[in-house]
């Protein structure tokens, strides 16, 4: 049985103050989600990610604030990511700093995957929050935090070319445009930041060369992506790559620096296969799309790489015992 993904309680930083500003009871919201009422006091405490995501959705609903997650991210700084901050802060350039975030983010949030790609003259920093149920606010927090980190690394004058969010377009978008300082696209196929690839080779403005030996020692004793079982590394890659429709076994193996045959052999040693992992991640993302978005079956089928809406419906019904439309209706009820 897979372990339930957890996140550091630092993800709650600012939550109590923001909830109170809307007249909400933060302790009551935490308890209702099955979380300790005093969880915010210990930033390194591990909390179940799913419970936290559901609480953020409930808080946004009660507050009548579609931008609750965005406002929450604005109350945080670079230090909220804990050890990951120390590792990335003194990397010499943006590319290597983002490489640290990609590799070591599981230390902060085991359900969040970050994927950096360069294609078509742009760089795309995409993030995926795993788990069932709506994750609109959690994803807003993740994208906004990544944007704030990039602005700290590159300087406050830096601007992205565009922000892309899977969430439906909110009634009021002014808060999003103000926070990002660029155009925000809603109801997209992925959530993330699009920017100039030349920015990746720009110097990290926070870096202090004198501290690099210290961070190198810290990196040597902390677990990262490479220390996870291969099956879990592939799950994380699949979550990010499916949204970009770039998900094939040879490409996944290439991203891992393995031949396809070696990848399959090592997965067999762990008791699974690439196609079984793909099926699991597709199921997870399908449930998230059905409960967290208004996308049609055809749109979800295309997003997950199925040849047709009918193929997706047949696959989903075989896995979940009912077609996606009925499953979505039951979840809404």
Image (cartoon, rainbow, N blue to C red):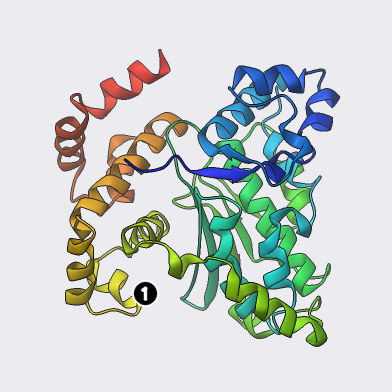
Label 1: few (<14), some or many (≥20) within 10 Å? few
Residue 2 horizontal/vertical position (percent): 35, 43
Give x and y (percent) for residue 152: 79, 67
Q: Is residue 317 visible?
A: yes
Indicate the position of residue 137 as horizontal and vertical percent values.
Answer: 61, 37
Residue found at x 59% / y 33%: 52
The residue where tag 1 is placed is 255
Image vertical order of residue 16 relative to residue 305, above or below: above
Instruction: Name the side, left or right, on which 322 lies relative to 168.
Output: left
Residue 264 in the image, given as x and y percentages of width and height = 18, 68
Q: Quadrant of the C terminus?
A: top left
Image quarter of the N terminus? top left
Is the residue 150 above or below the residue 191 in the image? below
Q: Pick the residue in front: 102 or 154.
A: 102
Image: 100 above or below 38: below
Q: Quadrant of residue 197?
A: bottom right
Query: Circle 1 sits in a helix, a strand or a loop, which is it?
Result: helix
Q: Nearer the viewer, residue 5 or 239?
A: 5
User: At x 79% / y 87%, what residue is drawn?
Assistant: 209
């Amino acid at each position: 049985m897979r372990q339930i993904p957890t996140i550091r309680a630092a993800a709650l930083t600012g939550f109590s103050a923001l909830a109170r500003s809307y007249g909400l009871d933060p302790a009551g919201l935490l308890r209702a989600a099955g979380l300790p009422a005093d969880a915010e006091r210990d930033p390194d405490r591990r909390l179940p990610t799913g419970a936290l995501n559901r609480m953020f959705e409930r808080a946004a609903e009660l507050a009548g604030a579609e931008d609750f997650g965005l406002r929450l991210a604005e109350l945080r700084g670079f230090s909220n990511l804990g050890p990951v901050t120390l590792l990335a802060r003194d990397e010499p350039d943006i590319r290597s700093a983002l490489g640290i975030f990609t590799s070591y983010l599981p230390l902060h949030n085991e359900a969040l995957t970050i994927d950096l790609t360069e294609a078509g003259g742009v760089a795309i920093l995409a993030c995926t929050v795993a788990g069932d149920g709506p994750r609109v606010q959690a994803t807003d927090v993740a994208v906004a935090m990544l944007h704030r980190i990039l602005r700290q690394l590159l300087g406050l004058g830096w601007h992205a070319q565009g922000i892309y969010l899977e969430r439906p377009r909110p009634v009021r978008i002014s808060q999003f445009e103000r926070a990002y300082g660029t155009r925000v696209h809603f109801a997209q196929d992925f959530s993330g930041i699009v920017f100039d690839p030349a920015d990746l080779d720009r110097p990290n403005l926070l870096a202090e060369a004198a501290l690099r030996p210290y961070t190198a020692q810290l990196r040597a004793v902390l677990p990262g992506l490479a220390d996870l079982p291969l099956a879990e590394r592939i799950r994380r890659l699949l979550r990010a790559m499916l949204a970009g429709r770039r998900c094939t076994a040879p490409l996944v193996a290439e991203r891992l620096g393995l031949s396809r045959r070696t990848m399959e052999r090592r997965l067999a040693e762990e008791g699974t296969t690439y196609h079984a992992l793909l099926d699991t991640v597709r199921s997870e993302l399908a449930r998230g799309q059905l409960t967290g978005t208004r996308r049609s079956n055809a749109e979800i089928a295309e997003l997950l790489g199925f040849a047709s809406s009918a193929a997706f419906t047949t696959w989903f019904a075989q896995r979940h015992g009912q077609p996606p439309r009925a499953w979505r209706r039951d979840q809404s009820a």
